[in-house]
């Protein structure tokens, strides 16, 4: 079910994760060709199957549902509905782990040990296994056993303190960014651990924390604090280290002006018919503009308000001054560049249901990501996986179904 030209076609990944961070990581690996076996609870599945509307499937039973949310992070995966809390189900995971390269899980710290599915237990079975645990706060420390959700992590990790208007309420980002960034970092760590395992034959335990990732992703803002000992504050759409770098109102809407250097500022001032600002000592350099933003920004705002958004985008574009519109998602996907790069796409499943998707941003010249198959129905591949990977026959599969150890698709 993988292409031999895919970079990770030789890898099998057991995905015991749910919701977003773990599935984001495994979808990235699946896009690059890895075989992803998604382990889900029979009769219920991943929580996000029912996180809607909107839904792809108009299913009366939540277990049969595929929400848009679920489909956004579960393409290129096979679904094995398996009760891992049962002795037989846990034993099947151990059998699969012995034949896998990677396992990803986001249970509470120590939550899998009682089933014999923790890193130490599986490492004894498969010493080369790369085992990635994703939690809110990591495997150790005073908060290790706390539940961690994206929204609270955005608040605890400092991101909300610098997001929003200066006099307004702290705001979260419009997507679960701590989860997405953790998933991306987890995929990177997994690839590094795989390379090490392939060289040495030794696997390892990866400890990924939403809290760690959230703070590490503060980038320049974290260093601004460490250098000055002053916590950065909310600046709305303004930038703490660059001016002018924010949104402005035009004659008929808004635009983003993103001046990154003094040459671009000089060009902007010429277009805006205020060349004297570029020559003024208070504004001639970025350092001066940051120090004097309170007087400069109103002058720029007055100039930009005199023309339409379309006029500014055309003139600034012709002169190499970075600027752009503020699109909603429909407009973003309708951009000529988005259409050219085919960012909005679709996958047709085995049931002939066409499911929209957003293409992987990874563009590899020799081993590009491939959208092989759509997000699966719950238990869609239970029999296929156990027969193909472990060699179970129909009689054994029938017993497992009768005992509710495995599940198959619910219509």
Image: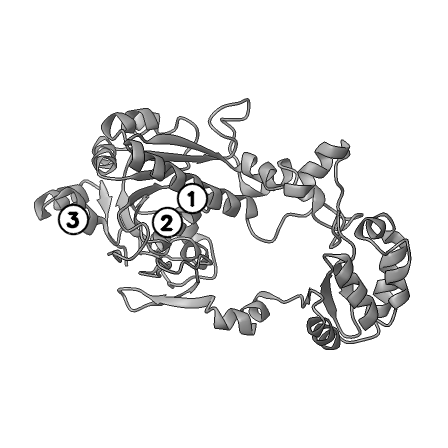
- Give the quarter of the figure containing the C terminus: bottom left
Residue 187 bears which disc, if any?
Answer: 1
| Residue at mark 3 | 388
Q: Secondary structure at mark 1?
A: helix
- Give the quarter of the figure containing the N terminus: bottom left
Q: Position of residue 250 (x, y in %)?
A: 78, 70
Instruction: Count the numbered circles shown.
Output: 3
Can see residue 191?
Answer: yes
Looking at the image, residue 228 lies above or below residue 290 = above
Looking at the image, residue 238 lies above or below residue 213 = below
Along the line of sight, the residue nearer the viewer: 345 or 49:
345
- Say whether marks 1 and 2 touch (CB < 8 Å): yes
Q: Secondary structure at mark 2?
A: helix
Along the line of sight, the residue nearer the viewer: 386 or 315:
315
What residue do we see at 38% from left, 53% from top?
Answer: 74
Along the line of sight, the residue nearer the viewer: 403 or 193:
193
Disc nearest the viewer among 3 and 1: 1
Q: CA distance from mark 3 to mark 1?
A: 26 Å
Give the image quarter of residue 192.
top left
What residue do we see at 51% from left, 47% from top?
Answer: 180
Disc nearest the viewer among 2 and 3: 2
Looking at the image, residue 14 lies above or below residue 5 = above
Query: Is 85 positioned to the left or the right of 207 in the image?
Result: left
| Residue at mark 2 | 29
Q: CA distance from mark 2 to mark 3?
A: 21 Å
What residue do we see at 55% from left, 74% from top?
Answer: 336
Disc on the earlier residue, 1 or 2 = 2
How packed is label 1: few (under 14 Cα within 10 Å), some, or many (20 or more)? many
Disc on the earlier residue, 3 or 1 = 1
Can see residue 47?
Answer: no
Query: Is 216 positioned to the left or the right of 46 in the image?
Result: right
């Amino acid at each position: 079910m993988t292409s031999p030209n895919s970079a990770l076609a030789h890898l099998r990944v057991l995905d015991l994760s749910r919701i977003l961070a773990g599935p984001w990581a495994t979808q990235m690996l699946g896009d690059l060709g890895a075989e992803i076996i998604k382990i889900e609870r029979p009769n219920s599945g991943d929580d996000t199957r029912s996180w809607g509307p909107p839904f792809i499937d108009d299913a009366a039973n939540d277990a049969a549902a595929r929400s848009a949310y679920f489909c956004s992070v579960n393409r290129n995966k096979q679904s094995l509905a398996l009760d891992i809390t049962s002795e037989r189900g846990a034993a099947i995971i151990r059998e699969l782990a012995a034949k896998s390269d990677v396992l990803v899980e986001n249970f509470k710290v120590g939550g899998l040990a009682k089933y014999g599915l923790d890193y130490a237990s599986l490492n004894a079975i498969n010493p080369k296994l790369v085992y990635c645990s994703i939690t809110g706060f990591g495997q150790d420390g005073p908060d290790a056993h706390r539940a961690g959700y994206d929204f609270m992590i955005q608040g605890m990790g400092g991101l909300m303190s610098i997001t929003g208007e200066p006099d307004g309420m702290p705001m979260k980002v419009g997507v679960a960014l701590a989860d997405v960034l953790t998933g991306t970092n987890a995929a990177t760590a997994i690839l590094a651990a795989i390379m090490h395992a392939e060289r040495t034959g030794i696997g390892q335990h990866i400890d990924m924390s939403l809290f760690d990732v959230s703070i590490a992703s503060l980038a320049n803002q974290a260093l601004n604090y460490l250098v000055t000992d002053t916590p950065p504050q909310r600046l709305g759409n303004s930038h703490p280290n660059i001016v002018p770098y924010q949104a402005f109102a035009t004659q008929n809407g808004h635009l983003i002006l993103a001046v990154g250097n003094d040459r671009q500022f000089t060009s902007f001032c010429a277009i805006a018919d205020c060349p004297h600002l570029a020559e003024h000592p208070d504004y001639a350099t970025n350092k001066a503009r940051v120090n004097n933003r309170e007087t400069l920004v109103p002058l720029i705002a007055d100039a930009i308000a005199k023309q339409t958004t379309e006029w500014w985008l055309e003139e600034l574009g012709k002169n190499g001054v970075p600027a752009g519109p503020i699109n909603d998602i429909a407009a973003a996907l309708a951009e000529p560049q988005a259409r050219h790069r085919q960012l909005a796409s679709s996958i047709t499943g085995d049931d002939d249901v066409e499911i929209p998707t957003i293409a992987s941003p990874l563009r590899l010249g020799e081993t590009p990501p491939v959208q092989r198959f759509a997000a699966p129905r719950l238990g869609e591949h239970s029999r296929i996986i156990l027969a193909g990977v472990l060699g179970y026959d129909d009689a054994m599969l029938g017993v497992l179904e009768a005992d509710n150890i495995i599940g198959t698709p619910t219509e």
